[in-house]
Image (tube, rainbow, N blue to C red):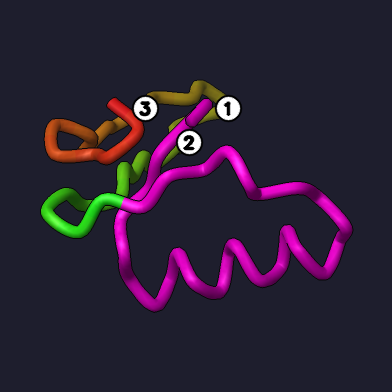
Amino acid sequence: MVSATATARLVDAMLEMLHDAQIDTAFIGRCHELSVGLYLISLNNGERSFSYWRDMSAAK
């Protein structure tokens, strides 16, 4: 396993998109007890700031 992700509909759609693009997902594990990571990029006068929610991320 190279990376891992949660088991959620959003992840299912992402993996399907990767498969359709002929990107191999064989080394992406699925963790039922963990969640997906999320980050947000905010712009303020051209300056970016980042917020992360990844404590329970399967890839962490």
Q: Position of residue 31 (x, y in %)?
A: 26, 50
First in residue order: circle 2 vs circle 3: 2
Whether label 2 touches label 3, CB < 8 Å: no
Identify residue for label 2: 43
- Judge left or right: residue 34 versus residue 3: left
Identify residue for label 3: 50
* Residue at 65% over, 49% down: 25
Give the residues drawn in magenta, as a range.
1-30
- Judge left or right: residue 58 versus residue 3: left
In the rendered view, tell whether residue 6 sits above or below residue 8. Answer: above
Residue type at mark 1 is Gly
How far separated are the C-alphas under marks 2 and 1?
6 Å
In the rendered view, tell whether residue 47 sits above or below residue 43. Answer: above
Identify residue for label 1: 46
- Judge left or right: residue 7 versus residue 41: left
Which type of secondary structure does the marked residue at label 1 adopt? loop
- Few, some or many residues within 10 Å of mark 3 (<14, 14–19, 20+): few
- Few, some or many residues within 10 Å of mark 2 (<14, 14–19, 20+): few
Where is residue 40, by image quadrant? Answer: top left
Whether label 2 touches label 1, CB < 8 Å: yes
Mark in front: 3 vs 1: 3
- Judge left or right: residue 44 versus residue 38: right
In the rendered view, tell whether residue 18 sits above or below residue 20. Answer: above
Q: Position of residue 37 (x, y in %)?
A: 31, 42
The mark found on residue 18 in the picture is none
* Residue at 40% over, 39% down: 4
How far separated are the C-alphas under marks 3 and 1?
13 Å
How far separated are the C-alphas under marks 2 and 3?
9 Å
